[in-house]
Image (tube, rainbow, N blue to C red):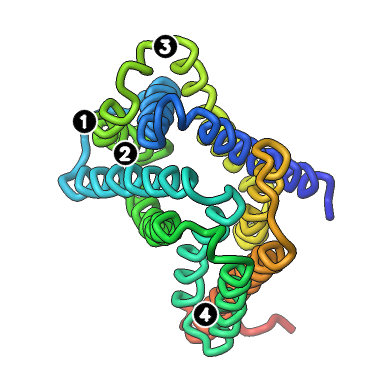
């Protein structure tokens, strides 16, 4: 591994750690603001920071572009809302593990290879191990929220790609985050109530936004300049492990050995699915290159 790649790996790991510290802090604030109140604070502060950094323009946008932004904003609000509602009822490591099933399923379907279903079976075994760790520890409603967040994450990937094609730099994300924040306002205000007048809570909400969104996103952008996308995706698959560690250290959420095995199996399935998808993409690119006809005939070799 080159020094540049090593730095990139460290940045991704730090970003993951910040994300889970932010989630842990949000969990501690649920008794004051409620999960939807914390979602609102996170989205509002994230939107403000993005608007300041990106300074996106309203001009020159197509109808399709704005529809993509509205769809992305809706997905952001729903995904974060369901994730925090799940966190209220489930351990952090378990919640993130279930949520990862969304992009994992998308990777398996996109690979279009029979071998990819091996990773689906492995992921299913991981989920079974989580369940075997004790359903009495896993609130059924919390599991449903986490599964909803998993589906939303898959839609997030698709919506993000669409917005990225329609808007330059961070413009589309800034507008989508703003729309998502607006959608979260009535639910967050109803959930948090008078607690929103507490300046300490507002400050901690800003900290959650910076830890969970701003720092990880910035570090990921830097890392992506030094790492292949497939390597980056594999590192991101470690999310359940960092979440379980953060839940143990910061929230005293202890997992039994079977639940840890389940998390490990889902991580392994995620890594395998990412590698399979990357291999399929390389093979497809190779086939396209082999069938392309050059525009100009090859020159005869000079004697």
The C terminus: image quadrant = bottom right
Extreme-front residue of the structure: 136
Residue 10 drawn above or below residue 297: above
Estimate how packed mark 3 is, as few (under 14), some (14 to 19) or many (20 or more) residues with alpha carbons within 10 Å: few
Look at discs 2 and 3 and give the one toward the viewer: 3
Distance from Cα at disc 4 to Cα at disc 2: 33 Å
Return the disc, 4 or 2, that comes first in the chain's sequence: 2
Q: Nearer the viewer, residue 102 or 134?
A: 134
Out of 113 and 264, give the one closest to the viewer.
264
Q: Quadrant of residue 257?
A: bottom right
Residue under label 1: 59
Residue at 58% across / 48% down in the picture? 92
Label 4 neighbourhood size at 10 Å, few (<14), some (14-19), many (20+)? few
Name which residue lies at 44% across and 54% down.
142
Mark nearest the camera among 3 and 1 is 3
* Residue highlighted by disc 4: 284
CA–CA distance in space, label 3 to label 4: 56 Å
Sequence order check, earlier mark of 1 and 2: 1
Asked whether disc 1 touches disc 4, contact meaning CB atoms under 8 Å apart, the reply is: no
Left or right placement of residue 56 versus residue 233 in this view: left
């Amino acid at each position: 591994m080159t020094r540049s790649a090593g730095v990139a790996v460290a940045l991704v790991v730090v970003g993951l750690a910040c994300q889970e510290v932010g989630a842990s802090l949000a969990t501690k604030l649920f008794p004051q603001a409620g999960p939807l109140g914390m979602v609102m604070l996170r989205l509002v502060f994230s939107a403000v920071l993005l608007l300041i950094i990106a300074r996106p323009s309203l001009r020159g946008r197509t109808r399709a572009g704005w529809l993509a932004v509205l769809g992305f904003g809706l997905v952001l609000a729903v995904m974060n809302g369901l994730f925090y509602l799940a966190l209220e009822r489930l351990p952090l490591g378990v919640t993130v593990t279930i949520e990862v099933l969304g992009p994992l399923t998308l990777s398996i379907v996109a690979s279009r290879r029979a071998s990819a279903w091996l990773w689906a079976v492995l992921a299913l075994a991981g989920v079974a191990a989580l369940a075997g760790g004790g359903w009495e520890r896993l609130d059924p409603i919390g599991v449903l929220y986490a599964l909803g967040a998993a589906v939303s994450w898959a839609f997030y990937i698709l919506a993000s790609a669409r917005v990225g094609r329609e808007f330059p730099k961070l413009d589309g994300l800034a507008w989508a985050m703003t729309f998502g924040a607006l959608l979260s306002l009535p639910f967050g205000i109803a959930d948090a109530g008078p607690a929103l007048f507490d300046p300490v809570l507002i400050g901690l909400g800003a900290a959650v936004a910076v830890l969970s969104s701003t720092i990880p996103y910035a570090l990921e952008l830097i890392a992506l300049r030094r790492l292949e996308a497939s390597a980056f995706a594999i590192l991101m698959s470690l999310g359940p492990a960092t979440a379980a560690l953060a839940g143990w250290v910061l929230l005293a959420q202890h997992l039994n050995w079977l639940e840890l095995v389940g998390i490990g199996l889902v991580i392994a399935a995620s890594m395998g699915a990412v590698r399979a998808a990357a291999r399929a993409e390389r093979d497809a690119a190779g086939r396209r290159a082999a069938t392309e006809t050059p525009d100009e005939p090859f020159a005869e070799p000079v004697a």
